[in-house]
């Protein structure tokens, strides 16, 4: 991999806690000496945060799609009736 | 852990097996079908996120989902009248989520960087193994999909940085 990608990998391993202890120690030393690397780490965390949010949104949409299927498709009619029965009063 | 195709199946199975019990419970407690849907879907998200990191002790998914849903119902019940969306009470919900600039960046990425976001969420959110990810995204092998993962991280990180700074300026 090219250097910039190796740097990304190192940062990723550090953020996820996957780096070997001696590598991580070195990484932390470099962070102290290099403010730019500290910023990179912060942006990296922010990026993973957004990826997490993106994934969750996607999952929610998939769950809603399943719900819609169950509440509209003819083959799930008995399931639907069973549920609706609980809310009749 | 779960490939996209299998995920839909899994969600369907969980919905069919566990939703009736949850709906029955919520109805008994005086809730509506929409309430039942809300707490159940929140419970499913929590269940899924725990399952993909291998953090589920109970293997009875139905009982587990009912347990979380009951908990969510109590929270919802207590918060009724407040306008706090239930989503905020999700364990891993991030407070930054509410930040307007953040949402704008996310919106931008969902359109301009969709393929990378799909790939990255497959790894970091759905915890798909390399082998499955390579197959799902059409890469020759684990190595090429790994390289692509870091390329995407680099690209998305640059975008996040650039857009966050722009939107922050815009808002403040």
Image (tube, coloured by chain):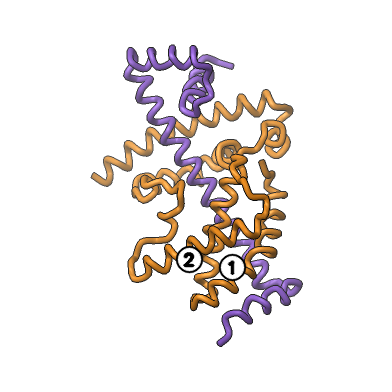
Chain colours: A purple, B orange
Pinpoint residue B37: horizontal percent, then vertical percent.
Answer: 55, 67
The image shows residue B16, relative to residue B118, as above or below, that is below
Instruction: Answer above or below: position of A8 versus B123.
Output: above
Q: Check whether the beta carbons of the residues at disc 2 and disc 1 lie within 8 A of each other.
A: no
Q: How many marks?
A: 2
- Seen as rendered, the residue at the extreme bottom is A89
Q: Nearer the viewer, residue B104 or B22?
A: B22
Q: Is residue B6 visible?
A: yes
* Tag 1 subunit: B
Q: Quadrant of the C terminus of chain A?
A: bottom right
Name the subunit of mark 2.
B
Label 2 and label 1: CA atoms lie apart by 10 Å
To which residue does mark 2 refer?
B73
Left or right of residue B9, residue B75 in this image: left
Is B101 above or below relative to A48? below
| Lower position in the chain sequence, tag 2 or tag 1 | 1
Graded by Cα atoms within 10 Å as few (under 14), some (14 to 19) or many (20 or more), the crowding at tag 2 reads many
Residue at horizontal 59 percent and vertical 49 percent from the top: B48
> Under tag 1, what secondary structure?
helix
**Residue B16: image x %, image y %?**
69, 65
Residue A13's label in the rendered image is none
- Mark 1 is surrounded, within 10 Å at the Cα level, by few (under 14), some (14 to 19) or many (20 or more) other residues, namely many
The image shows residue B95 at horizontal and vertical percentages of: 37, 47
Residue at image position (56%, 37%) is B124
Q: Is residue B118 visible?
A: no
Query: Which disc number belongs to residue B22?
Result: 1
Secondary structure category for the residue under label 2: helix
From this viewpoint, which residue is outermost toward the left?
Answer: B172
- Foreground of the two, B26 or B14: B26
Q: Nearer the viewer, residue A10 or B77?
A: B77
Query: Are labels 2 and 1 on one chain?
Result: yes
């Amino acid at each position: 991999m090219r250097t910039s990608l190796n740097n990304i990998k190192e940062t990723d391993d550090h953020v996820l806690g996957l780096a070997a202890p001696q590598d991580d120690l070195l990484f932390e030393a470099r962070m102290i000496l290099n403010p730019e690397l500290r910023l990179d780490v912060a942006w990296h965390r922010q990026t993973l945060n957004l990826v997490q949010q993106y994934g969750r949104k996607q999952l929610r949409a998939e769950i809603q799609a399943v719900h819609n299927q169950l509440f509209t498709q003819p083959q799930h009619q008995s399931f639907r009736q069973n549920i609706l029965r609980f809310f009749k009063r | 852990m779960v490939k996209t195709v299998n995920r839909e199946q899994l969600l369907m199975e969980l919905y069919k097996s566990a939703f009736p019990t949850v709906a029955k419970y919520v109805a008994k407690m005086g809730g509506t079908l929409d309430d039942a849907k809300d707490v159940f879907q929140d419970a499913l998200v929590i269940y899924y996120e725990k399952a993909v990191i291998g953090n589920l002790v109970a293997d009875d998914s139905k009982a587990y989902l009912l347990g979380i849903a009951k908990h969510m119902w109590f929270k919802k019940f207590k918060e009724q009248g407040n306008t706090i969306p239930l989503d905020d009470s999700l364990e891993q919900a991030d407070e930054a989520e509410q930040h307007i600039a953040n949402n704008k960046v996310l919106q931008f990425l969902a359109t301009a960087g969709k393929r990378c976001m799909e790939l990255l969420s497959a790894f970091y959110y759905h915890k798909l193994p390399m082998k499955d990810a390579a197959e799902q995204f059409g890469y020759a092998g684990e190595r090429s999909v790994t390289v692509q993962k870091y390329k995407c991280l680099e690209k998305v990180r640059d975008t996040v940085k650039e857009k966050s700074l722009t939107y922050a300026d815009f808002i403040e």
